[in-house]
């Protein structure tokens, strides 16, 4: 009897997570449509979403991260679009839009990051993560409020996006320094 109750509880939990995930997907698609944009790709199921989230989280503590704070959204979008254009050999990438916490990952063509996701930075309140589990690399685009102004903080981890990393280092703001797992601005703040 105990195993039966446990099985029912587990099924109910999975059904709740699936319902939340489906609702988040509809909300996310609607948000993009409201801004005359789209998010087109193949949505991941709960199991794959959990695996991708674990893989991305594992990379989060890497000391080889490049972190930058972009004070102007438009400047970031233009620079990032030109930097993404130089990437070759990456066909698909997994994306998680952080504005809706229960949203699943979506597998998109790499080119769609520049055409669909970067323009959304102007209205997203949290941002997105682009993760390639094969290259063990990710790009995090975090939209933050800073004293009433919005800034974009980007993090690039892994060698898979070395061309984007080089481009960001050349064209973007100075990298933030990581001191004992804390991120500090180049001027010491």
Image: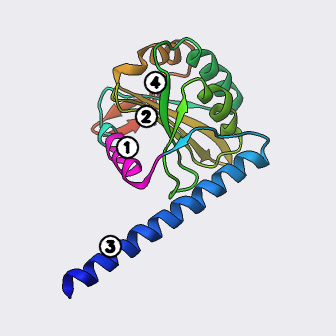
Q: Secondary structure at mark 2?
A: strand
Task: State the image coordinates of residue 181 (x, y, percent, origin top left).
Answer: 30, 40
In the shown orientation, is residue 78 left or right of residue 175? right
Residue in view at x 52 percent, y 66 percent: 19
Q: Residues within 10 Å of mark 2 (few under 14, many from 20)?
A: many
What number is the disc on residue 175?
Answer: 4
- Give the distance between the C-alpha atoms of the residues marked 2 and 1, in whole angstroms: 8 Å
State yes or no: residue 55 in magenta.
yes
Q: Secondary structure at mark 3?
A: helix
Magenta span: predominant SS is: helix
* Residue carrying label 3: 10
Q: Earlier in the sequence, mark 1 or mark 4?
A: 1
Residue in view at x 57 percent, y 14 percent: 171
Q: Residues within 10 Å of mark 1 (few under 14, many from 20)?
A: many
Task: State the image coordinates of residue 66 (x, y, percent, origin top left).
Answer: 41, 26
Note whether 67 is above or below 126 in the view shown. Answer: above
State the residue in front, 21 or 177: 21
In the shown orientation, is residue 30 left or right of residue 105? right
Q: Residues within 10 Å of mark 3 (few under 14, many from 20)?
A: few
State the residue in front, 88 or 162: 88
Note whether 78 is above or below 146 in the view shown. Answer: above
């Amino acid at each position: 009897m105990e195993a039966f109750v446990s099985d029912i509880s587990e099924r109910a939990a999975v059904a709740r997570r699936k319902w939340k995930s489906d609702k988040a997907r509809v909300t996310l698609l609607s948000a993009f449509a409201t801004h005359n944009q789209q998010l087109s790709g193949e949505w991941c199921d709960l199991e794959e979403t959990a695996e991708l989230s674990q893989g991305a989280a594992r990379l989060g503590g890497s000391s080889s991260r490049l972190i930058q704070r972009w004070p102007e959204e438009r400047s970031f979008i233009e620079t990032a679009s030109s930097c993404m254009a130089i990437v070759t050999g990456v066909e698909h990438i997994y994306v998680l839009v952080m504005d809706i916490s229960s949203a699943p990952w979506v597998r998109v063509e790499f080119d769609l990051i520049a055409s669909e996701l970067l323009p959304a930075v102007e209205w997203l309140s949290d941002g997105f993560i682009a993760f390639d589990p094969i290259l063990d690399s990710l790009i995090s685009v975090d939209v933050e409020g800073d004293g009433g102004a919005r800034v974009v903080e980007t993090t690039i981890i892994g060698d898979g996006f070395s061309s984007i990393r080089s481009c960001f280092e050349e064209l973007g703001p100075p990298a933030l320094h990581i001191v004992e797992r804390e991120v500090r601005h180049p001027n010491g703040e």
